[in-house]
Amino acid sequence: MSDKTKHSDKNSLISRFSIAGISEETLTNAADVAKLLCKQSYPVDSSPLDPRHFNDYQGLIFELSRKK
Amino acid sequence: MSSPLRSIEEMRANIDDHPKSIIEQTSQAVSNLDNLGRKLNAVAYVAKDDSIARAKHLHNSVLRGDGNRTSPLLGVPIAHKDLFMREGWPCEGGSKTLAGHHASQTAFVIDRLDKQGAVDCGRLTSVEFGLGTTGHNTYSGTPTNPWHPKYICGGSSSGSGAVVAGGIVPVSLGSDTGGSVRLPAAACGLVGIKPTHGLVGRSGVIALSPTLDTVGTLTRSVRDGAIVLQAIAAVDKHDHGSVSFNFPHLLDKLEEGITGLRIGWPTNYFFEDTERTVTDGIDKIFHLMGHLGAKCVDVDVPGIETANAMTMLITAVEGASLHEKTIIENYSAFGEQTLARLLVGFFVPAYDYYKALVYRAISAKQVLAETFEKVDAVITPVWPYPLPTIEESDLGTNPDAAQMILQSGHNTRPVNYLGFPAVNLPIGFDTNGLPASVQFIGAPFTEAKLLRIARTVERELNFWSVEPRLSVLTK
């Protein structure tokens, strides 16, 4: 996703919640924390990422529950 | 009066000898919840009439010779975090946004405990919707630690920690999305069990993050924890994440020791940024376990470095999604910190949330293959520093507390991301004289082994020979 698109999304969200009455400062802080979390959570090695893995977690738990 | 620190088995034995003690024990628990529990800021609701009526019903059943007389929980008074619903009872989730709300259903686990004959006595203070690690709550009050009233109970199952440590009830259920059972258990000197993802049903428990939420137990002993986990581990058809697992009888091998079991000291992540005194305390336990027959080795936990942030990211997105309508319509009813944490979720791009979910299976498989093929359990800290006071960890009055609070879940959140089980065990006292703990993490569905490890260490330390300083509270 481009920085321009991300910036636009951020502004539209700030606008949406500002209308509800939440201060712009609070919303900007939340956006900053979100940005930091995304940066910190980037997998060390993202090469094995594959959409098929989306269902793998529950499958793994089911498989392990049958094994023991 | 008998000691308030009786175990489930002691209470149960009492009932076998004197059935009327079902009513006496319940009356005492209700009275203590109403008095000492409220002094500790730990009580959201005391179900006096319902619990006494329930105790009388159980007593009559025992006299008639019917009912579940073999249940280890028959007549045992309990109370739970204010996220667990019982039809008709108040359930506010520690939030002004649910002020005056009454539950329209009964949680799966509450129903399980009912069927075992336990006596539900009330609801306990929670951090708002379970979103916080220190226990602070500007709406329902911040519980004080029974070991010292200036200190936090940890969160988010803060009231649960306070009343069990205070000897009011022997067990309480809590929920754990990033450490909310283990952190208060550690702060209050309790055994906290966070089970494998899917092992314990969650329907009827106010959700924070359906991907990461688990239901766990807080007790004063490993045996009590095992008894309660045995009672609640079952398939919940209303919980999409619930799995069927043929649990062994947890008490059977609990006393068999740890000879030959492999305990791993993590060489990456967990002890980073941990205060030296905390590490030293756990190092002593690690060596003790070697003397008790365990094989103690160093082990790597690959890829765990990002799991802390992944957990916070998933929690923020799912929490924001669950509370979106209320935020837009009535944002000022939320506590300031809760609102700030929830709002983060709206700003996380879908791409990053999806990536965090996709990476979960990869990460879990990697840790299974490279860590838990080599060891039976990993030993880690819970709190990375000595327990803070209520004042110094209050973000509302002390903005400098932000880093401390962020760091509080460093050792617990990654376990929720993996969905693996973990047990918190008290091991002594920190430099401030408050309880200190270790966490044992295992592979999925190895709760029996983790509890056996914890029980072996518990037997050596006899932590609960020291009672909390409740006298401070009665002055």
Image (cartoon, rainbow, N blue to C red):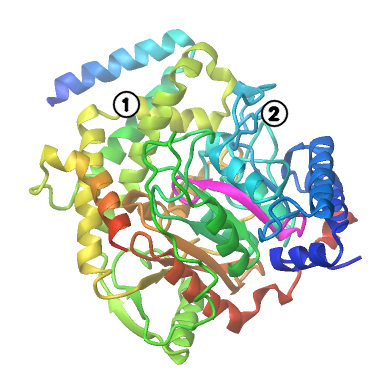
Residue B20 placement: quadrant: bottom right
Which residue is disc 2 drawn over?
B90
Q: Residue at x 12, y 47 (%)?
A: A46
Q: Residue at x 87, y 49 (%)?
A: B27
Which residue is disc 1 drawn over?
B347
Q: Position of residue B179 (x, y in %)?
A: 48, 51
In this view, the mark in front (1 or 2): 2
Disc 2 marks a residue whose amino acid type is Pro
Q: Considering the numbered disc 2 on the image, is that residue within a helix, a strand or a loop?
A: loop
Q: Position of residue A55 (x, y in %)?
A: 21, 40
Q: Callout 2: residue from which chain?
A: B
Q: Residue at x 21, y 57 (%)?
A: B365
Disc 1 marks a residue whose amino acid type is Phe
Q: Crowdedness of circle 2 by 10 Å Cα count: few (<14), some, many (20+)?
A: many
Task: State left or right for residue B48 relative to residue B66.
Answer: right
Task: State left or right for residue B74 relative to residue B174.
Answer: right
Q: Is residue B445 above or below residue B283?
A: above
Q: Residue at x 17, y 52 (%)?
A: A44
Q: Crowdedness of circle 1 by 10 Å Cα count: few (<14), some, many (20+)?
A: many
**Magenta-colored stretch includes residue B357:** no
Foreground of the two, B201 or B218: B201
Q: Callout 1: residue from which chain?
A: B
* Distance CA(mark 1)–CA(mark 2): 33 Å
Magenta region? B165-179
Foreground of the two, B47 or B390: B47
Q: How many marks?
A: 2
Q: Position of residue B168 (x, y in %)?
A: 77, 55
Q: Position of residue B252 (x, y in %)?
A: 52, 74
Quarter of the figure that contains the C terminus of chain B:
bottom right
Q: Is residue B298 visible?
A: yes
Q: Considering the numbered disc 1 on the image, is that residue within a helix, a strand or a loop?
A: helix
